[in-house]
Image (cartoon, helix red, strand yellow):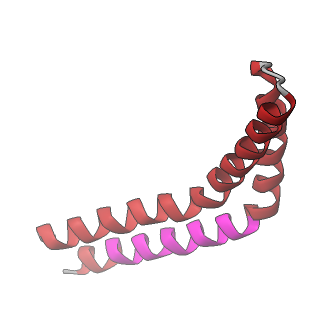
């Protein structure tokens, strides 16, 4: 196993983490921005107001994107197992 292969696997792992988490983080960020704009325009400065909409939106995003996330992770896992098999065979 060469250093180049290790770096490639680590790069793919980090990209997979970013790609899989991006929809959920994006939804949380957008909902947080909308709630912040709402708080600014209405002068409501309640700190707990941001949590409930974000939690609901993130749970909804997890439900919506779950099949895509699982498919992506299964493909990546199969790729890693095939690399392990190739390394084991020599």
Please tell me whether residue 83 belongs to the stretch shown in magenta.
yes
Q: Of residues 41 and 77, which is closer to you in this image?
A: 41
User: On the picture, is 40 further left or further right than 24?
Assistant: right
Instruction: Reply above or below: 7 against 45.
Output: below
The overriding secondary structure of the stretch rendered in magenta is: helix
Residue 80 is covered by the magenta coloring? yes
Front-most of residues 11 and 28: 28
Q: Where on the picture, by quarter, is residue 81?
A: bottom left
Residue 4 image position (x, y, % from top left):
15, 72
Q: Quadrant of residue 9?
A: bottom left
Viewer-side residue, 72 vs 42? 42
Range of magenta residues? 67-84
The image shows residue 48 at horizontal and vertical percentages of 78, 21
Q: Is residue 81 left or right of residue 44?
A: left
Q: Is residue 39 left or right of residue 10?
A: right
What residue is shown at x 74% (from left), y 61% (from top)? 66
Taking the image as shown, residue 19 lies to the left or right of residue 58, namely left
Residue found at x 63% / y 51%: 25
Quarter occupied by the N terminus: bottom left
- Number of numbered markers: 0
Observer-nearest of 50 and 39: 39
Which of the 4 image quadrants contains residue 39? top right
Residue at 82%, 25% in the rendered image: 43
Residue at figure coordinates x 21%, y 72% from the top left = 5
Give coordinates of residue 11: x percent, y percent: 32, 66
Percent x, y of residue 42: 87, 31
Q: Indicate the quadrant containing the C terminus: top left, top right, bottom left or bottom right.
A: bottom left
Q: Is residue 27 above or below residue 50?
A: below
């Amino acid at each position: 196993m060469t250093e180049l292969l290790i770096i490639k696997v680590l790069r793919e792992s980090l990209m997979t983490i970013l790609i899989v988490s991006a929809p959920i983080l994006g939804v949380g960020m957008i909902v947080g921005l909308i709630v912040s704009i709402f708080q600014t325009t209405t002068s409501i400065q309640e700190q707990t107001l941001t949590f409930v909409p974000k939690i609901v939106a993130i749970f909804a995003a997890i439900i919506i994107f779950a099949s895509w996330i699982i498919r992506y992770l299964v493909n990546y896992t199969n790729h890693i197992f095939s690399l392990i098999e190739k390394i084991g065979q020599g």
